[in-house]
Image: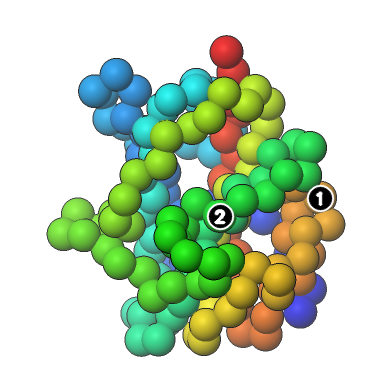
Amino acid sequence: LPISPPYVGSKGGLSLRVFRNRAGVVDEAVSGEKFQARDRLRFNVGLSAEGTGDTHIMIIGVEASGKRFTYYPQQGPDRSAAPAIDQDGLLEGAVALDDYVGAEWVHLVACPRAFTGDEIRLEAPDEVSEVPEECRVRSFLLQKVD
């Protein structure tokens, strides 16, 4: 299923918010902002009211080189999971950024069923070109600097 170019979110629909903890100071980041190695990230995923039932999600990171990895879920094979959200609306678990410098895209894929990473096609690091039918995507750019 081809999709339109990535964007952060839309009012009332699927959204991806990124919170950064740098040296004990937590703030909400904006797509395109600068990040540093060892910044810790937490993700907030907003699902529309009609999309909360059996929704499965995966958050995929892609470096400019095309190297791909899974931010969420953190354990197990490259498979989606029903979101585990804490009392603040954040996904459980935090991730620390590595030393990679450059653009890194974070893609949230939400589907009404379980799926695997093999079902997600990337045209380029910043462009998710294919997802399973009825899935939605929101993307976020991390500019990682020294």
Q: Is residue 11 visible to us here?
A: no
Q: Residue at x 24, y 23 (%)?
A: 24
Q: Please say which color scheme the image uses.
A: rainbow
The amino acid on which the numbered mark 1 sits, given as a three-letter code, is Ala
Q: Which residue is mark 1?
A: 124
- Closer to the camera in the image, 117 or 113: 117
Looking at the image, residue 23 lies above or below residue 47: above
**Residue 75, percent from left and from top:** 43, 60
Q: Earlier in the sequence, mark 1 or mark 2?
A: 2
Element under label 2?
strand
- Residue 31 higher or lower than 136, as above or below: above
Q: Residue at x 52, y 82 (%)?
A: 114
35 to the left or right of 139: left
Q: Quadrant of the C terminus?
A: top right
User: Which residue occupies the extreme right position in the image?
Assistant: 123
Q: Secondary structure at mark 1?
A: strand
Of discs 1 and 2, which sits in the foreground? 2
- Between the residue at mark 1 and the residue at mark 2, the CA separation in whole angstroms equals 16 Å
The one nearer the camera, 21 or 28, is 21
Q: Is residue 20 above or below residue 89?
A: above
Q: At which x and y percent is residue 68?
A: 68, 50
Residue furthest to the top in view is 146
Location of residue 117 (image quadrant): bottom right
The amino acid marked with disc number 2 is Thr
Crowding at dot 1, Cα within 10 Å, few <14 / some 14-19 / many 20+, comes out as some
Foreground residue among 65 and 124 = 65
Instruction: Point out residue 1 in the picture as x, y percentages from the top left corner.
Output: 76, 79
- Looking at the image, the residue that sits furthest to the front is 76
Residue for badge 2: 70
In the orientation shown, which residue stands out farthest toward the left?
A: 87
Residue drawn at x 37%, y 33% is 40
